[in-house]
Image (cartoon, rainbow, N blue to C red):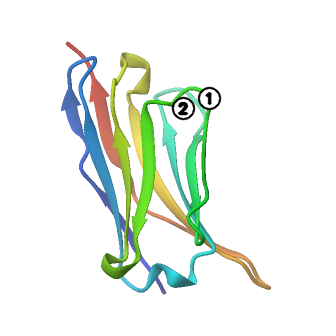
Amino acid sequence: QVQLVESGGGLVQPGGSLRLSCAASGSIFSFSSMGWYRQAPGKQREWVATITSGGTTDYADSVKGRFAISRDNAKNTMYLQMNSLKPEDTAEYYCRGTVVGPPTKRYWGRGTQVTVSS
């Protein structure tokens, strides 16, 4: 069973940058896609960005142009570069890997906290 572990969160001022990492315990080649999600206090978890095994990326409108998702298959790690951070980006960030079946399986990390505040 593959495990995903996020890191890189922290406290940053508005306009600052952070890079989140999502390290897999096994090969990420098995994931047809990987993505980042976030959940702010009192809100539902929302999708942030996705990257496919072929490298195709997609972003939520709220982060487009500011965030960049990438993956390093050799290191079994996915990244989220976050620039021009805003207070509304404050949330717990989770990574997810999807293995297309049958059955289709989705694996989640435990999250890393990002706080944007002056």
Choose top left, top right, bottom left or bottom right for residue 71: bottom left
| SS assignment at label 1 | loop
Q: Residue at x 33, y 31 (%)?
A: 83
Residue 103 image offset from top left, x and y in percent: 77, 83
Quadrant assignment for the C terminus: top left
Q: Residue at x 34, y 24 (%)?
A: 85
Q: Amino acid at mark 2?
A: Lys
Quick check: marks 2 and 1 in contact, CB under 8 Å? Answer: yes
**Would you say 117 lies left or right of 60 here?**
left
Residue 113 image offset from top left, x and y in percent: 31, 41
Choose top left, top right, bottom left or bottom right for residue 66: top left
**Would you say 68 lies left or right of 18 here?**
right
Q: Amino acid at mark 1?
A: Asp
Q: Which residue is mark 2?
A: 64
Q: Residue at x 47, y 57 (%)?
A: 95
Residue 87 image offset from top left, x and y in percent: 36, 17
Q: Is residue 16 above or below residue 69?
A: above
User: 44 and 55: which one is in front?
Assistant: 55
**Disc number for residue 61:** 1
User: 50 and 3: which one is in front?
Assistant: 50
Q: Is residue 99 above or below residue 5?
A: below
